[in-house]
Amino acid sequence: MQARTVVFLISAAAIPAIAASPLAAQQSQLDVHGDYSHAVSSGTNSWGAGVALPVTWGAKSSPVRVATSPGFDWTRESGGGPSQESLGLDVTAQPGGNSTVTPYAGGSASANWSTGTGKQWEGSRLGLEALAGAQITLRPDKLSAKLEERYGYVSHNDHMWTTRAGLLFSL
């Protein structure tokens, strides 16, 4: 299955949740984060950074809110190895309310390219991840921090544990 098809299917699956909530009750943010990944079998490590545009759907008073987050990430293997570019879509669920710490969990599908010196493959490959994290409000309706763990793989590659830490700016 092509990566674009999976991203489209995840987007289509999110439409009922989005349509069920009032469009006025949404929160848009700019997510700027750093990435650290560890390959399970090979033991290689990668570092990088990314940007995403999360939109949380539904009223804050809803018992559960859904967030969709298209994003781009770039990572490079430690020691000057190949780099990887990823264009993906995260879909997560989180409790409603006005808590200072908001946990969330969900999944991600992405298209991935190996680039740079010693690139590992040609063209794009599908990536799938499960993710869980927490968003910490630093300044209400202005600034939050996040810490997130991901586990998944890019098709025909090693499974990876990825830690993301970043800041979210309200738009």
Image (cartoon, grey):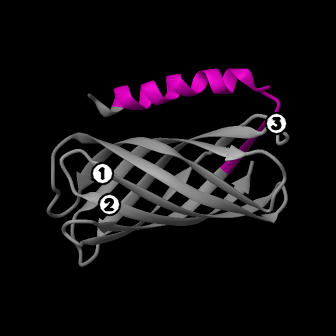
* Above-or-below relation of 9 to 42: above
Identify the residue at image location x=54%, y=55%: 132
Identify residue for label 2.
160
- Secondary structure under tag 1 reads strand
Horizontal side, residue 132 vs residue 65: left or right: left
Of label 2 and label 3, which has the lower sequence position?
Answer: 3
Magenta region: which residues?
4-29
Figure quadrant of the N terminus: top left
Q: Which disc, if any, is residue 72?
A: none
Q: Which disc, if any, is residue 153?
A: 1
Residue nearest the viewer, comparing 33 with 160:
160
Horizontal side, residue 135 vs residue 163: left or right: right
Outermost residue on the front side: it is 63
Snapshot quadrant of residue 82: bottom left
The amino acid sitting under disc 3 is: Ala
* Above-or-below relation of 26 to 154: above
For the residues bearing labels 1 and 3, Cβ distance under 8 angstroms: no
Q: CA distance from mark 1 to mark 3?
A: 33 Å
Identify the residue at image location x=32%, y=60%: 160
Snapshot quadrant of residue 120: bottom left
The amino acid sitting under disc 1 is: Tyr
Residue 146 x, y percent position in the rendering: 63, 63
- Mark 2: give few (<14), some (14-19) or many (20+) Cα within 10 Å: many
For the residues bearing labels 1 and 2, Cβ distance under 8 angstroms: yes
Residue nearest the viewer, comparing 155 with 49:
155
Main SS class of the magenta portion in the image:
helix
Residue 150 x, y percent position in the rendering: 44, 57
Identify residue for label 3.
59
